[in-house]
Amino acid sequence: MKRRDLLKSSGALLGAAALPMLKTSAAWAAPADTAVILIGNTINSLDIHRPGTNRPSYQVAVNCYDRLVTFGTKTLADGTLVYDYDTIEPELAESWTIAPDRKSITFKLKPTAKFWDGTPVTAEDVKWSFDRALALGGFPKVQMGAGGFVEPAQFVVVDAQTFRIDLKKPSKLSLPNLGVPVAVIINSKAAKAKATASDPWAAEFLHKTPLGSGAYKVERWDSGQQLVYVRNDDWVGGPKPALRRVIIREVPSLATRRALIERGDVHLSFQIPNKDAQELTANKKVKVVGAPIDNCIYVACLNQNFEPFRDAKVRQAIAHAIPYEQIHKQAAYGRGVPMWGGKSAKPTEAVWPQPFPYTTDLDKAKALLAQSGFAKGFEVPLSYDLGEADWGEPAALLIQESLGKIGIKVTLDKIPGANWRTVALVEKKLPFLLENFGGWLNTPCYYFYWAYIKGNLFNASNYDDAQVKALVEETLHMEKSDPAYAPKILQLIEKAFVDLPRIPLWQPTLESAMSPALGGYETWFHRQVDARSMKLS
Amino acid sequence: MSTFVVILGRLLQAVPTLFGIVAVVFLMTRALPGDPAVFFAGPAATPESIAEIRAQLGLDQSLATQFVQYLGALASGDLGQSLSTGQPVADELMRRLPASLELTLVALLISVSIAVPLGVLAAVRQDSWIDQLCRFVVTAGVSLPTFFTGLLLLYVFYFLLGIAPAPLGRLDILFVPPPHVTGFYLVDGALAGQWDVVGSAAAQIALPSVTLALFTLAPLARMTRAAMLQALGSEYIRTARAAGLSRARVLFVYAFRNALLPVVTTLGMVFSFSLGANVLVEKVFSWPGIGSFAIEALVVSDYAAVQGFVLSMAVLFVLLNLCVDLLYTLIDPRVRLDA
């Protein structure tokens, strides 16, 4: 290399760097039927059945694929649109009948339903898709199991337009579980053409290329940057979406997302922190929508393996020492539904979640601790997930301060996100922790099944009670209309009040900030962007 | 010995180093807390489903078997599959490395074109206002964290003034990336003659590269100033002045050229650390670079991705050191490659 050549070429590079800045604004320049949506996480697969597919990727299952059924929409008192668990509506199925013995459900498919490539949707596709969810294992298999679907023989093709599911036992969870993101219907003919001997379920192909019948097709996927949906004009699953194109942009920095929505350069910033939600409500140019997340509570778990927490008086003392209101103000920024200060020690309504009958009362807490076997107090680490630090840290600090006043010395233990699931939920070895489980299927028994039964994943407290176990077994599949159902749920809730393996702090909300021009935004149990109902005015 | 043979020899010498790095990184990722099988088994995992995922990922095998399998794949150029992004690690690196390199190179270009003249002037006019300015810039550049300068620039130029475009990555939403040649949008756009794309890419890269430039300015300016001072105080400069050579000739041909060696060394170091350290800038400007990829991978114990990242960085450093050594021979004929 000669010095002269080097100098020449660097001169050319300097010229390129001196180009002027250009001002272009994404949302203003975009056509009126295109929406730009920001998310904070990355979409890592377009196939929900694939092992390793992360939560933000579930939105592809929602927008690009259809299920047999979907849920209706209801309007809350403040005008917020949310899905309605109690109304099940057709998506690919035209109608369904439940057998008199309730041990099978027969679906008639919409005869006009077509996949994007024009092939009609048949019962064969439904069976293949459900078989696939079981075969690929992992989370899809577990979620299918929640509806009682555990083996392929249960999925029966009656004829091209008729599909039947045989149930081992009747369950109220079966039909709703066909409306969750996992129960998608895939174009089996096109997928099989891409399958190989080592990959019989075309997992490699579907990972990058969806084959669905849904409202939106994927036009472009730049991994780590953006996903672009374009409308499928032949969609029969529901009313034709208003937006023709939807651009999902991944913007990791919170501050950048906030600047973009405040400048009006994007239409929706999906899932914002409570702090931003509280501050942005004052901004006239931005609309903030938040709705409570069904069947989800932020709780403090008391692990029964930890000696002092086996003492009921200690647990009650803690329930009276937690500064609920301060936590709600400083960790939740006033968003979310209070879960403390319940009127009566006996629940009167079979709804979940509901406020527990405890309020912050340090004198009572001191008295309870004095009566317990640990009157001198003790030391305990309080663990929280660093990935949830936005609420976990302030909540943990407030709990630490307040428990200190009654003689319980709390140390803080921050656990990195990668490690959290292992130590908190699988090994269940943390004595005292903040947890945030929410169930997709919105029934109290479903929450109790996951969080109050020994060995189940979200029972981080190692709670084990024979009566609760029996009650959950009885109620899990029982119809809600069964006269025996509500009394049993009341019993369960009362046990939760008294035994306190989990002390609820508040019920969280899903908050999003959007341009006032964006309408039809709906909050779903799966906590994903559903672009199908959105419109721009 | 021809230059080519020397370069080849240098590259071969790097092989054992790279092998060592591969082995250490393999063991270190396994020693990290966190179990990828649990993480990727999803929100409602049961012990059975976790075991299934573990088997699918090959994590139920012994460490030695896993290492041999990894080496075998590596030999055939397969860096494995990233779990967190769902893409082959090699593809991911190929796509993200140019983004980071483009950002770092533009930033260094800005940085050098300010820092070197500033350092030279500060040395020539010691304790003058320009020396004070140099001191101020250096202190500010070092003491302000990059994410802070990034957010500040964003707030002023995008949020308040609206001059800069929306911080949404390498191109405005309306543009499609130019055909891939080098992976640098500024270059590829120009090669394809798509000047609007080049304009958008330049507008997008402006704020992040200035942020990074402010950070890298300090060591370069300091080093230039110090090296110039040393050169100017040396005997050959006194001799040159005594011989009546012109001021410009003394300054640029004799002093500056001799001061360049430490500056180039610093430049190499600054380049390598800023390539890894611009994660925060990448996050603030949604830049799809290699730093944010590595951090995400580390957080979720994505072994293949972390290993691929470290390996590619190691290779890059070997090449970079070679380039720096080549530059030495240009600047100072006394320095020889095979020495």
Image: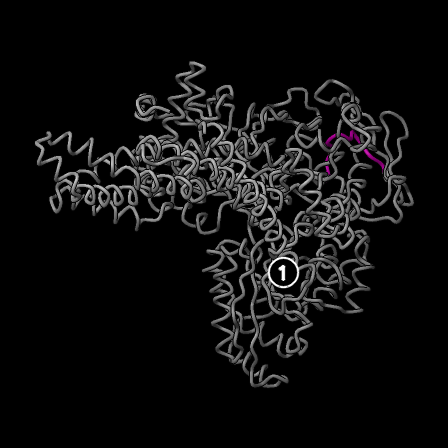
Please state the horizontal and vertical placement of residue B261, each as a whole percent of the image: 30, 39
Depth check, front residue: A307 or B113? B113
Q: Which chain is indicated by disc 1? A: A
Image point 66% across, 30% down: which residue?
A: A208
Residue extending farthest front? B1
Horizontal and vertical percent for residue A474? 83, 59
Q: Which residues are drawn in magenta?
A: A88-97
Q: Locate residue B12 relative to residue A14 in the image: left or right.
A: right
Total labels drawn? 1
SS under mark 1: loop
- In terms of image quadrants, where is residue A4? top left
The answer to if B273 sits in the magenta stretch is: no
Q: Would residue B162 be visible to someone looking at this image?
A: no
Label 1 belongs to which residue? A354
Q: Residue A491 occupies which quadrant of the picture? A: bottom right
Camera-nearest residue between A88 and A60: A60
Name the residue nearer the viewer: A211 or B213: B213
Question: Relative to B329, is A296 above or below?
Answer: below
Magenta segment: does it hold A90?
yes
> Residue A488, located in which quarter of the rendered image?
bottom right
Q: Label 1: how many residues lie within 10 Å, few (<14), some (14-19) or many (20+)? A: many
* Amino acid type at image mark 1: Gln
Q: Residue at image x 50%, y 34%?
A: B97
Judging depth in this view, the residue of A145 and B221 nearest the camera is B221
Viewer can see residue A472: yes
Q: Where is residue B236 in the image (x, y as percent from the top left)?
A: 17, 39
Q: Is the magenta stretch mostly helix, strand or loop?
A: strand
> Can you name the residue that lies furthest to the top here?
B193
Q: Which residue is drawn at 28% across and 44% down?
A: B218
Left/right of residue B108 with respect to residue A155 in the rendered view = left
